Amino acid sequence: MNLRSLDAPAPPVGALPAFAWREVSVVAAVAGTLFLIRLDRYRIGGDELYFLAAGRHPSVSYADQGPLVPLLAALSDQLAPGSVVALRLPALLFTVAAVVLSAVMVREFGGGRLPQTVAALAYATTPMAVMQSAMLSTFALDVTLTAVLAWLLIRWVRTRADGLLIAAGVVAALDFQVKWLIPIIWAVLAFGVAVFGPREMLRRPAYWVGSALLVGSAVPILWWQHNNGWPQLAMGAVVRDEQLATAGVLAAPWTTIQVTGAGGLLLLAGMWAGLRSPRFRPYRFLIPMIAIGLSGVVLAGLRPYFVAGAFPGLFAAGAVYLADRGLSRRGLVFGGAIAGLATTVCVALVLALPRPESALRTATENYAQIHSRSVLFGPSGWDDLVGSVRRTYEQLTPQQRAGLVIVTQNYWQAAALEHYGPAAGLPEVYSPNRGYGYFGAPPDSATTVLYVGVDGPEGGLRTGFAHSIPLTRLDEPLGFPGVNRGVAVWLCTGPSRAWSVLWPDAEDLRLVDGTTRHAR
């Protein structure tokens, strides 16, 4: 077979349908308002506290992510200290942008007002959008930036405007400052273009300028990773283990349905359209990106939102495909029922969650329950943790407090104590866990520490002490593991090695939460 025959011709360049500003604006405004009114209902999360801590330790890279989200967290803390609404506003704005982008992609495919509205509504009513807008996270930004990258390449296919390829490189470079999956996506997209066309894209200097921008943005991050032992390589296995502990490979289809909701049917229509409809033949270079992403979720246990960057494009393709085919009266009724069901589920999730902690009846025993508890009830226990450490610290003599630091076993504990500790009069906080370990070790002069952990200090820090005395036990039966359940505070003196020496051995990228998954 002549591979050139697979290089699809460019779609005709002509006037696009009018953008459905009124309809899409209504969908985006209603969704944005609905998400906004519950933005402060969840208590601040452990990862959000970590983002704030990372923002106070500025760096070109971190062990587990790029610098953009910590930078946004630091900015929000400067503009509106203590406001979770300000902290989460970027997640909300990126979610609304993805809603609008779904309609923009429909227009790019030649779809009119109705399919534009359908695609926007489909994205806005997914449980994924509800989750994306709820808290500041790396995936909240990454999902939308990946979709923008795909849209720029789709638009280039129609217009051949090379500025779009440079813009795609800028977006990819920005996304690399959030998560580090984008080079893989860029490479897979190039592979798709080489196989399905248009290969002309790869011959354009602007494409290589865009690629150079992505590579250039990676240099500081890669240099940091090189100097710190490439922790991101180990993080991949950690993330996979955490996802498999949340829901195993066999549960991946169900967790995917939980992310897509009833609108998943339109995603399936979009996949079918990409494979079968001649209208979408010029855009089949996107197929490998979607196929590899789905394979990673279903077969390798990756988190379902890893493929969510394809949602706007798939919703758009599905809406245009169904509009092209025309729907019977029965089909319109069925489609309306699906849209109504998706909207009802979305509104119910926003209004019902989080549930009050008083409704919690079951102890949290494993990592999967931690995830479901976080979704249903939100994070909790920070006040108990900070209060217990504060009371313990206040019981120490002035001689014991002199030069004392706090060392925690996991990064959530450290982030909470660093965030709330100054107001409670607590000293400096350190932790060897996750990215916190790269913020620096305690000074070698700190021979007395308050150790906070779920394991004892010798196990948690992998070093001995001349004296270790447990002072406080925090173990609420319905508490949050690692926060106010299964946690002890120890007074430790005389570490057997200097902190600068023992710290690399103590570093642990896993979230040590005290559940059986982390038992030693």
Image (tube, rainbow, N blue to C red):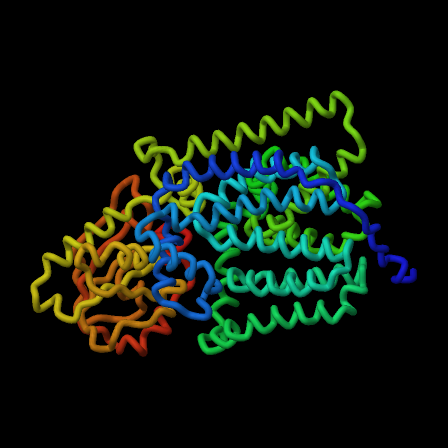
**Rendered location of residue 466, percent (x, y):** 18, 72
Could you tell me how many numbered marks the image carries?
0
Q: Is residue 259 toward the left or the right of residue 320 in the image? A: left
Q: Residue at x 65, y 35 (%)?
A: 117
The image quadrant that residue 219 belongs to is bottom right
Whether residue 424 sits left or right of residue 124 in the image: it is left
Q: Which residue: 37% across, 74% down?
A: 504
Point out residue 449 in the picture as x, y percentages from the top left corner: 20, 66
In front here: 42 or 13?
13
- In this orientation, which residue lies closer to the viewer: 127 or 303? 127
Residue drawn at the location 42% of the way across and 61% of the way down: 71
Q: Is residue 216 left or right of residue 291?
A: left
Q: Can residue 257 be seen in this view?
A: no
Give percent across and percent down for residue 474: 23, 49
Above or below, 203 relative to 415: below
The residue closer to the viewer here, 483 or 126, is: 126
Q: Note whether 63 is above or below 129 in the view shown.
A: below
Quadrant, the C terminus:
bottom left
Which quadrant, please, contains the N terminus? bottom right
Residue 397: image location, x then y, percent: 7, 63
Going by the image, does 200 lie left or right of 386? Answer: right
Relative to 223, is 106 above or below? Answer: above
Q: Can residue 191 be seen in this view?
A: yes
In this orientation, which residue lies closer to the viewer: 494 or 169? 169
Which picture quadrant has residue 469?
Answer: bottom left
